[in-house]
Amino acid sequence: MTTSNLLTPGDSFPALTIKHPGGDEVELPLPGEYTVVLFYRGGWCPYCNAQLRAFRRAHDKLADLGVHVVAVSIDDEATTQATIDKHGLTFPVGHSAAARAIAEATGALVNPAAGYIESTGFVVGPDGKVLVSVYSSNAIGRLVPDDVIGFIRYVREHERAAA
């Protein structure tokens, strides 16, 4: 599971197309927006489900800061829709991601036995540059909403002070 193409702060986030159940697509990075991008292992992973629910619960605080969330896994469309429905997710959740292509583009780790993307998270700025990258080599170690909220508040305060 080694990789040499980790994205670090200041790197441009790669252009990715995320397929949402029902046929809609989301083009990343979202221009002019702060975006949290979550690659999760799959709807079967309890830690991933907890992370997705946590970001759903933090929706209002994130929205107040102008932060959008997009999640994606290798799950098929039906499984992804079931995950969305089960947890009442209101942010875009993509399906059928090509794990190896995601890994090549972002440095995300892929489980060699099962082929899913390990938990990986990014905070991407309005300019499409990575602000934070969090890579996990297994079930734990992932972005949490409170950290993102605190970080974006910090960034915004420094933006105002520099203006």
Image (tube, grey):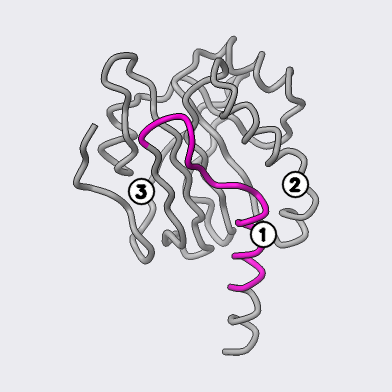
Query: SS of the residue at dot 2?
Result: loop
User: Magenta includes 9?
Assistant: no
Q: CA distance from mark 2 to mark 3?
A: 26 Å
Q: CA distance from mark 1 to mark 2?
A: 9 Å
Query: Closer to the observer: label 3 or label 1?
Result: 1
Query: SS of the residue at dot 1?
Result: helix
**To which residue does mark 3 refer?**
14
Q: Observer-nearest residue: 111 or 56?
A: 111
Rendered location of residue 54, percent (x, y):
70, 39
Mark 3 touches mark 1? (CB < 8 Å): no
Q: Is residue 14 left or right of residue 120?
A: left
Mark 1 touches mark 2? (CB < 8 Å): yes
- Mark 3 or mark 1, which has the lower sequence index? 3
Q: Is residue 75 above or below residue 100?
A: above
Q: Is residue 46 above or below residue 69?
A: above
Residue type, numbered disc 2: Ala
Q: Is residue 13 above or below residue 90?
A: below
Residue shown at 34% from the left, 38% from the top: 108
Quarter of image, res 63: bottom right
Q: Is residue 34 left or right of residue 110?
A: right
Residue type, numbered disc 1: Ile
**To which residue does mark 2 refer?**
58
Quadrant where the N terminus sits is top left
